[in-house]
Image: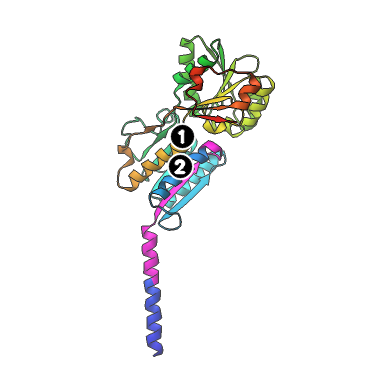
Amino acid sequence: MVKKVLSLCIAMVAVFTVSSFAQEAQRIKIAITQIVSHPALDKVRKGVEDVLEENGYKNGDNLELTFLSAQGNISTATQIARKFAGDKPDVIVAISTPSAQTILAATKEIPIVFSAISDPVEAKLVSSLLKPGGNVTGVSDRADVAENLKLLKEIKPNLKKLGYLYNASEVNSVSTLKVLKELADKMGIEVISSSAPRSSDVQAATRALINKVDVIFVPTDNTVIAVLEGATKIALETKTPLFTLDSNSIGRGPFIMQGVSYYNVGVDTGKLVLRILNGEKPGDLDVVQADNKNIQVDRKIIEKLGIILPQTVLERITEVVE
């Protein structure tokens, strides 16, 4: 009798163990990383996670989701990339250029979906936006700089000098600056750039533009956006308007933004992840260009600066922050 009970217990343990291994084998593994935590990149991640959940992938059930932030440190980003390459997840989502570059350097086999990258070609992540090949595809948040300049000229017809606040080490920001200068020159606008190598340099870089420009253009630069309040303090003291491409920065100082919705960027990214999980190869999937039609304004900042928006702009505003 004791032998029968013992045999039954052993059989039950064996069945449970096999069942656990089977569940583990069926669980999809997604690894997500981003260079730093700030509202724009966090919304991208939220969009990815929501798409996965809406399509039946539940974290802790049939999905093992890992997230690691590099906290603004390239060395940490490299360590994360090596860890993920060793973990061999089904897909790696890399949010921001530095994170994507370190991930791609770490693996040429695991499918990679990058996100929130202005110029993936310039960043050497892909050689083409159409069927990029290899193990990578993703979503670009490249600004429609021509539309940005058109909007600023509508608001300030006498715009002559445009400041540009950025980190010269960020590929996205350098790429945007190049296009901005080319287009602005044709419109008779001089672009004056000021670089902040570290977040602690942002205030000094902002001061360097004061009394030299009519408006300061703030791209989706991780270094600047992370401490935008520092730039805002100086800009408001001198009544220098801040324009930004980052929708999550409205309410933090800029009077207006025009660009993408970063949550929607995340949704587009999540859809690419789903396609890869369903068997498509990342290299066969075109890089997605996010929609740039989002225009938001901060009513309080507009009133403080005494800016009057023309009717043509008012009609295109998608959100007003009070």
Q: Secondary structure at mark 1?
A: strand
Q: Which residue is mark 1?
A: 116
Q: Is residue 178 above or below residue 48?
A: above
Classed neighbour count for the residue bearing mark 2: other residues with Cα under 10 Å, few (<14), some (14–19), many (≥20)? many
Residue extending furthest toward the right: 237
Q: How many marks?
A: 2
Q: Residue at x 66, y 19 (%)?
A: 239
Q: What's the coloring here?
A: rainbow
Q: Is residue 81 visible to us here?
A: no
In the picture, measured across the screen, residue 285 lies left or right of residue 293, that is left
* Picture quadrant of residue 119: top left
- Camera-nearest residue between 246 and 29: 246
Q: Residue at x 37, y 86 (%)?
A: 4
In the picture, measured across the screen, residue 12 lies left or right of residue 322, that is left
Amino acid type, label 2: Gly
Read off the magenta span.
Answer: 16-40
